[in-house]
Image (tube, rainbow, N blue to C red):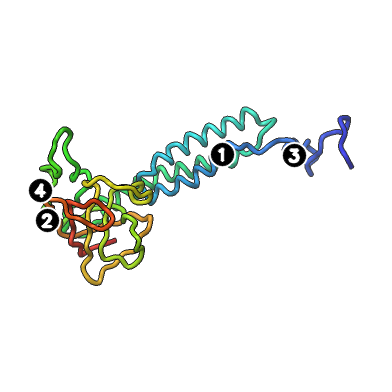
Amino acid sequence: MTATLDSPPAQTPEGEPDYDRYRSLSGIAVGALIVGILSLLSIFAISLLPLAVIGVGFGLFATRMVDRNRDLLTGRNLAIAGTIISAIALVISPSRYYYEEYINIPEGYEVMAFGSLQPDLGSTARVPDKAWQYDGKRVLVSGYVYPHDQKEGLNRFVLVPDFDTCCFGGQPKLTDMIEVRLQEPLRVDWSFNRRKIGGTLTINKSLHQIKDLTGVYYEIDADYVK
């Protein structure tokens, strides 16, 4: 039966007016859910943590917008779900990062951050003094495998510090690259996962040429990979 202007609104099984059928699904609420799902990537890549922060704020905003326009919009549960997922990522991501970087480390290595390899502000030295303290030492450093033509069974590759440099190509900064040579029988496959590499660091006084890139100052003869 076709409804007319004089027809009463459709009813729910309980006999209440079914206003939901006249409301639209909020695009903002759907967006909040999508951002929440994407924020889960920050659990595996700490550089994406701002996405979780944005997701929480966007989810709260979407929930409020739906509440303010409840006569016209639906999707409150989607907005809340997106907020909760983003909040979960916001808690788990830094917790996992801290555990992997500072607790779950093998013995016999000195933890080294890529920041220790960066030149000092205003300095013309390619390799900063703070980096030389690691020369010849067994270090543990985390980063991403830089993509080359070969993607599987790698025993030699370049390690870079962040997700963007790893996955979107381009020429990384010279101090953002470490050439890694894995000892037998160690091998890795390229992926979006952050790798933990352990081995002896060698610093070159002059640029060491490598395939497809300008070259590197830092090399690791690695006996540990995770």
Give SS at disc 4.
loop
Q: Which of the two discs, 1 and 3, labels the residue nearer the N terminus?
A: 3
Image coordinates of residue 110 in percent, x first then y, are 16, 53
Is 13 displayed left or right of 121 in the figure? right
Residue highlighted by disc 3: 21
Residue highlighted by disc 1: 79
Residue highlighted by disc 2: 137
Image coordinates of residue 180 in percent, x first then y, are 22, 59
Task: Give the CA separation, mark 2 to mark 1.
Answer: 50 Å
Point out which mark residue 133 bears: 4
**Disc 4 residue type (three-letter):** Gln
**Disc 3 residue type (three-letter):** Arg
Identify the residue shown where x is 41% and y is 42%. Answer: 90
Give SS at disc 2.
loop
Task: Give the CA separation, mark 1 to mark 3.
Answer: 19 Å
Task: Give the CA separation, mark 4 to mark 2.
Answer: 8 Å
- Viewer-side label of 4, 1: 4
Q: Which of the two discs, 2 and 3, labels the residue nearer the N terminus?
A: 3
Towards the viewer: 123 or 198 = 123
Q: Which of the two discs, 3 and 4, labels the residue nearer the N terminus?
A: 3
Give SS at disc 3.
helix
